[in-house]
Image (spheres, rainbow, N blue to C red):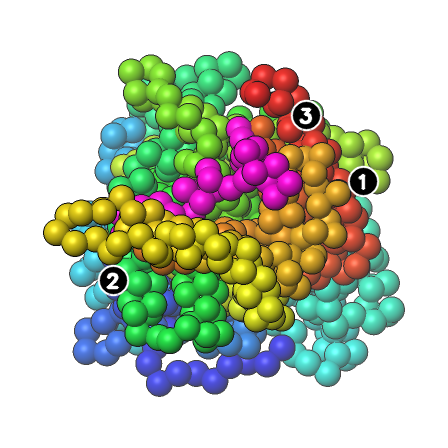
Amino acid sequence: MPTSPAPTSPTIALIGNPNTGKSTLFSALAGIAQRVGNYPGVTVEKKVGQWQLDDQSCQLIDLPGTYSLAPRSPDEMVAVDVLLGQQEDTARPDAVICIVDASNLQRNLYLVSQVLEMGLPTVVALNMIDVAEQKQIQIDVEQLQQRLQVPVVTIQANRKTGIETLADTVGQALQNPPAVPEELFPESFQQERALLLKMLQEHSETTVPGYMVTRLLLDSTNYLGEAGIVEMTSETSAALVQARARLAEAGHPVPGVEAVARYGWVGRVLEGVVQYPDQRQQTFSDRLDRFLTHRLAGSVVFVVLMLLVFQAIFSWAIPLMDYFDAGVGWVAGQADGWMADGALKSLLIDGVIAGVGGVLIFLPQIFILFFFVAILEDCGYMSRAAYLMDRLMSRVGLSGKSFIPLLSSFACAIPGIMATRVIENRQDRFATILVAPLMSCSARLPVYVLLTAAMIPSRAFLGGWISLAGLVMFSMYMLGIIVAVLVALVLKKTLLKGETPPFVMELPGYKVPSCRLVLGRMLDRGWAFVRRAGTLIFAVTIVIWAAGYFPHNVETENRVRNQYAKQLQVLEKEPVAQDGENQDATAQLAIFKNEIDKEVAGAYLHESILGHMGTAVEPLVRPLGWDWRIGCAAIASFPAREVVVGTLGVIYNLGDETDAESTQLRDKIRQARWDDQPEKPVYTIPVALSLMVFFALCAQCGATLVTIGRETNSWRWPLFAFTYMTGLAYLGALLTYQLGTLFFS
């Protein structure tokens, strides 16, 4: 792998176990001077910031949280590549800050032992010292520093305590050579490693770092060789097998020898350094976990908590949505006054503003969703939710490791699918990939909110805490989860048979969420949605507008106006209103002309390319309760689900109705009638539910299907996903409408 050139300013890497306060420390050091992206080819988030260290500005890299530097997937390989200087877009760090949890040193020092082997100047940041004191854990910091042979600094990242001392210590570490790490492995392992290194040097054109030789010898899964990270030949592969066999005969089998060696070293380091209370006291976290992780009580809390979240999403955002609606209406009104009638005006108002504006109006719900998710992540509850969900997932053949990718899919299925790279088992990974799109992502939220607000009655329960609209939205999310569980069960019983490995996760202590981190995550994820909406939706909206506008034959307008010419003449003969007289006649004339304009717009749409497409599919969608206009919106939404709202804005030409305080699209939906039955409304409660169920289950995102193909390295799986999800969506919408009509007339 190519090594990046060293920058002019020092580069400091920040690494640690999950839930040790690493992100909090990064924010405390970098402040607002940080940027977020992704490492090339992986889903791992890349966070880089600037840290003012004495008189110079340092580049600070926040490496992904990890328990070990034993890579078994592309995502886990990132931290190793960065520390070895083999990440093509990142310079090798000049020093490493290894943040550890003072209350769990035995577990955290395992990673420290691996970091020390990288041969970089290292500083150990002893965080959460207050938590250790609460647990009556006493740590001799000076003796710990002598045992580790690297500087140790006590900090409280959440309170920014010890930051100045940490800065001074890192500055000194940059001036000193790295410490020579203690040899942890037995002599027989050292001999086999030396032989393997010699053979790799003889048969490889590239230099293999000593740490990677260790990892190659310990990698019983053969990930490093199969992925091409270490260049292997038939000779070196055979030698590797023989070396592992000799180690097993010597009583040091791979990979168990590493745990024995490293935890043995940890025990020697901590002996006499850490003193624990004679009797472990039950902490607040312990008492809370007895309730929140209980099989019954914990599940009830999880469901209630999710219900309250989605209720808040719906109710809290209404005032903000009104402001967005007013803004979109004002922009459309300004454009209407500035421009002459024609294709360009229609493109701007009916295409761009109605399409993109119709999606952006739902940003309050999206930001609120990300806000609550960030809070639950930062306070430590998400790990408990993963533990609870593992009980369910194990019954359908999935591991608890599938929970995080599926949770990520509620924001967007693409990063959720990419996050499955951490799942070692192929069958579990593919099953998770295939059900991830069933999670109701943020792109579905505008559809749910629009139809819920337009068609679901305003009823409240429990003193106004829960509304019927909130229950409907919650049910759509639960529908996706339930269907995903059932599909995963079928897949693990048929196409993807295999044993599921046990789920192991360390539960972090509860803490008060950091406002900086919560707001940062909310803004990052929300802005990602805006970028996607502003590009893909814009392009699709233009296409939909063109399909709904052309051929725009003038004869269509003449035909419609001729039908109402005589009625218009009669009304125009009425005297013009003067001094308050004949007000009714004048108003009636204005209303009649407006209705004619709407008829003209509808006729243009019906005879457009989009109208012909909708008419062609209407026999197929009519059993779902849909007319040709809804069919058009469904067709247009296959590139991206959120496009359906913008498409409906284009289809239901709002004309000059730009009242800033109105919810125009919702009103249009309520007023829509069947072409062949003018007295019959198109949208009813069964139709709204049918449409929401369809979008909850359908694979209507082209980018998601492309990602499935890339992650599975086959076109068959995205084709399978599209087929089964579309079939489920149609069947679910059909059953919802047909059963709904039995209860709602």
Q: CA distance from mark 3 to mark 2?
A: 56 Å
> In the image, residue 708 lies at what x, y percent?
69, 55
Checking the image for residue 666, the label placed there is none
State left or right for residue 173 relative to residue 213. left
Which SS does the magenta portion mostly show?
loop
Residue beneath the point at 62% across and 56% down: 606
**385 and 322: which is toward the camera:** 322
Residue named by callout 1: 496
Between the C-alphas of marks 3 and 1, the distance is 34 Å
The reply to whether discs 3 and 2 touch (Cβ–Cβ < 8 Å) is: no
Relative image position of residue 55 (x, y in whole percent): 19, 78
Q: Which residues are drawn in magenta?
A: 660-685
Report crowding for label 2: few under 14, some 14 to 19, many 20 or more residues within 10 A (C-alpha): few
* Residue wearing tag 3: 738
Tell me the SS state at disc 2.
loop
> Label 1 amino acid?
Leu
At x 46%, y 15%, the residue is 297
| Numbered label tally | 3
Q: Quadrant of residue 198?
A: bottom right
Q: Residue drawn at (12%, 51%), measured in percent from left and top?
A: 579
Q: Position of residue 123 (x, y in %)?
A: 34, 60
From this view, report whether residue 681 is shown above or below residue 169.
Answer: above
Q: Residues within 10 Å of mark 1 (few under 14, many from 20)?
A: some
Tell me which label, 3 or 1, sits earlier in the chain.
1
Residue occupied by mark 2: 31
Instruction: Kindly report which numbered mark, 3 or 2, lies closer to the viewer in this rendering.
Output: 3
Residue sitting at x 45%, y 63%: 350
Residue 700, how many percent across, how many down? 64, 51
741 left or right of 67 in image: right
| Residue type, mark 3 in image | Gln
Q: Residues within 10 Å of mark 3 (few under 14, many from 20)?
A: some
